[in-house]
Image (cartoon, rainbow, N blue to C red):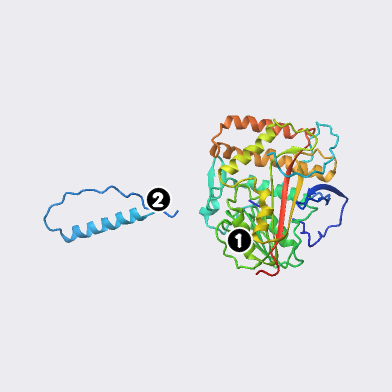
Amino acid sequence: MGDHNGKGAAADPQTPPTPTATIGTIDTTGNASATSLNVTDTDTQGTRSPGASTLDLERDVRPESEEERVTQTQQQQDDDEQNDAPPSVTDSSAPSTGIEADVFDYDDDDAYAESTSTSYLTSIASDIRRGIEENGRLYAAYGMHKAWLPIDDAELDRNDLQHCKLTLLLENKLFIAPICDNPQNILDLGTGSGIWAMDVADTYPSASVIGVDLAPTQPSMIPPNVHFEIDDIEKDWLYPRNHFDFIHGRELIMAIRDWPRLIRQAYDHLKPGGYLQLCGSYPAFQSDDGTLPQDSAYIAMGQIFFDMSERVGASGREPRNWKRYLEEAGYEDVVERVYKVPTNPWPKDPRLKKVGAFELEHFREGIANVFARGYTEILGGDPVYFQVLLAKAREEVTNRAMHSWVPFYYVYGRKPERVY
């Protein structure tokens, strides 16, 4: 599932600049860089069964009446229709620049953020809109593969919270790819609550923005230049080729089985000179000063995510491969940046402190709850053990003496102006 006021690198935010802080990033060309960030408050063919068992019927040799022939013909047609019907981490490429820790009164637990929930669209068929309910959560009913993230209000709140956190992380910008000043067509993959698509539509009134996802979880009141579609982005796309100025995908958690194919499809549907940007977390939790012990329950939770994602064929380790996939697909000027996201409000810098508050809420009340279903259904784990581990991880992550952070990858590339 993907995610109002920011812009990409090509267009500066309209709000006046505020004091900036610096967070370390890594460019995979090998050059460490520093990004200035403003402080703001603000994705069977049915096989015929072996068939009903053949019945040897004893019949009289007398001629059949017309009524008997009609009855037997109808029975044979019904049998034929029934038979033909289909059956019902620790080795992450991490930034080297440290974040200065603040000195805390550890009884102070403020600085939590709120997010807003969104309503379902009302114009979509009810069977898709309702989704599938399991263990008190709603999941998408559409798509090639089973959805592992829910689509209910609690998940949409998590989605909006992530949007606020990542917009703050990027200097109140919505992306970092240097797209053109006046894009005409933008595609948001795994749009989720639609908040990113709506914000980018407000930022670029000239653009027609499409948000696509497996479920209609977007609000009904939206900017006039954005619309939402239900589709599975792992299938063949029906959009025109050479059409989009910018394609964006964020936090497609356990959703993509074949990243090279998705990246090639994006290439085909981008205009020459258009950009693809992918971004997502890589939950190999770590610290620069050794305050996160390696036997931490928090680290164990990250490993559970990797185990689950690999078991379903949608590996959570793929963000480290995105840069290579883009280069192999023919993109030019491919850039990878890895940001440090503090896991609680431990940094001294006010902006990073707020980013950490967002991330703490995200873990404690959002994504950790999603792990429970995957741990039992995918890994076959003991739910009681998981709840004990989760309680311990939630306690650890509130400790601001533990200066942990999670890598967040941004990768973008440009389709060549001339494609041979």
Residue 419, label in figure: none
Q: Amino acid at mark 1?
A: Gln
- Image location (x, y in percent) of residue 92: 71, 43
Circle 2: element type: loop
Front residue of 150/259: it is 259
Q: Position of residue 93 (x, y in %)?
A: 73, 45
The front one of 323 and 215 is 323
User: Which badge, 2 or 1, is on the more N-terminal residue?
Assistant: 2
Q: Split into 4 quadrants, where in the image is the C terminus?
A: bottom right
Residue 95 falls left or right of residue 123: right
The one of 298 and 113 positioned closer to us in this rendering: 298
In this rendering, the answer to whether 367 lies above or below 128 is above
**Residue 301 visible in image:** yes
Q: Which residue is mark 1?
A: 265
- Quarter where residue 291 is shown: top right
Check disc 1: other Cα within 10 Å, few if <14, some if 14-19, many if 20+.
some
Which mark is in front, 2 or 1? Answer: 1
Residue at the far right in the pictured view: 19
Tell which of 228 and 254 is nearer to you. Answer: 254
Q: Residue at x 74, y 63 (%)?
A: 179
Indicate the quadrant where residue 309 lies.
Answer: top right
| Secondary structure of the residue carrying numbered label 1 | helix
Where is residue 379? Give x, y as percent: 55, 37
| Residue for badge 2 | 87
